[in-house]
Image: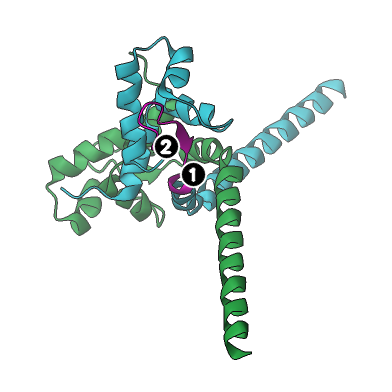
Chain colours: A green, B cyan
Amino acid sequence: MIVDQLSTTFAALADPTRRAILARLTSGEATVTELAEPFAMSLPAVSKHLKVLERAGLIARGREAQWRPCRLDPAPLRDANEWLETYRQFWEESFDRLAEHLRKLRGEQEEQTNDDEE
Amino acid sequence: MIVDQLSTTFAALADPTRRAILARLTSGEATVTELAEPFAMSLPAVSKHLKVLERAGLIARGREAQWRPCRLDPAPLRDANEWLETYRQFWEESFDRLAEHLRKLRGEQEEQTNDDEE
């Protein structure tokens, strides 16, 4: 089965530890040891997550054999964002409908209050 | 293991058939039979995908026992988009760097061309 890039990106993002690793890399390059620190995870467990991120093209790793520092590669995030943006009108519409509903509800309540006061 | 909502959303999106189902639902409600048509898939296979989408809150299903039409619920897409937006500056920066690099490259080529013409 050929897995498309977008599926690989979303699958890589479907894990809180991997998302936390990406968040950490927004403040600069880091080694595996540095990345492992906040997670109370073994180095092999972190390395496994890094492999998933690297295969998805979300991180790139340096060539220095010992350190191999990781850095964020945001290109797949841009593509995932582009896909999601095609749905923007739908979540904005439902937000508008909710706002409209709340406005009506508030209007009715105010009328009710005015009726009570009369 | 408690799976967070964002992980559930991304996992549901990590499949081209499920993304195609969401795309189909942007043009309105559809029954399982209608959704199955373009995919040359069995109804049970499509139903399985619908269950994943429903659990992620990306679709809602009607209550009519026989038809149970599906409709898009875009709220989780909005939340996924919000998460991705926090990385926007990073992909825009790398795009700017690439554009700058190409500009320089073009400048050098033009200088080269001018040198050749002199």
Spatial distance from mark 2 to mark 1, Cα to Cα? Answer: 16 Å
On the picture, is B93 further left or further right than B40?
right
The residue shown at (56%, 32%) is B28
Using the image, name the chain to which the residue with label 2 belongs.
Answer: B
Instruction: Classify the position of the C terminus of chain A by image quarter.
Output: bottom right
SS for callout 1: loop
User: Which numbered disc flags the more N-terminal residue, 2 or 1?
Assistant: 2
**Hey, which residue is sitting farthest top in the picture?**
B40
Along the line of sight, the residue nearer the viewer: B24 or B117? B24
Q: Could you confirm whether marks 2 and 1 are on the same chain?
A: yes
Along the line of sight, the residue nearer the viewer: B102 or B61? B61
Which tag is nearer the camera, tag 2 or tag 1? 2
The residue singled out by tag 2 in the image is: B62
Magenta range? B62-77
Using the image, name the chain to which the residue with label 1 belongs.
Answer: B
The three-letter code of the residue at mark 1 reads Pro
Along the line of sight, the residue nearer the viewer: B107 or B30? B30
The residue shown at (56%, 38%) is A82
Q: Is residue B95 magenta?
A: no
The residue singled out by tag 1 in the image is: B74
The three-letter code of the residue at mark 2 reads Gly
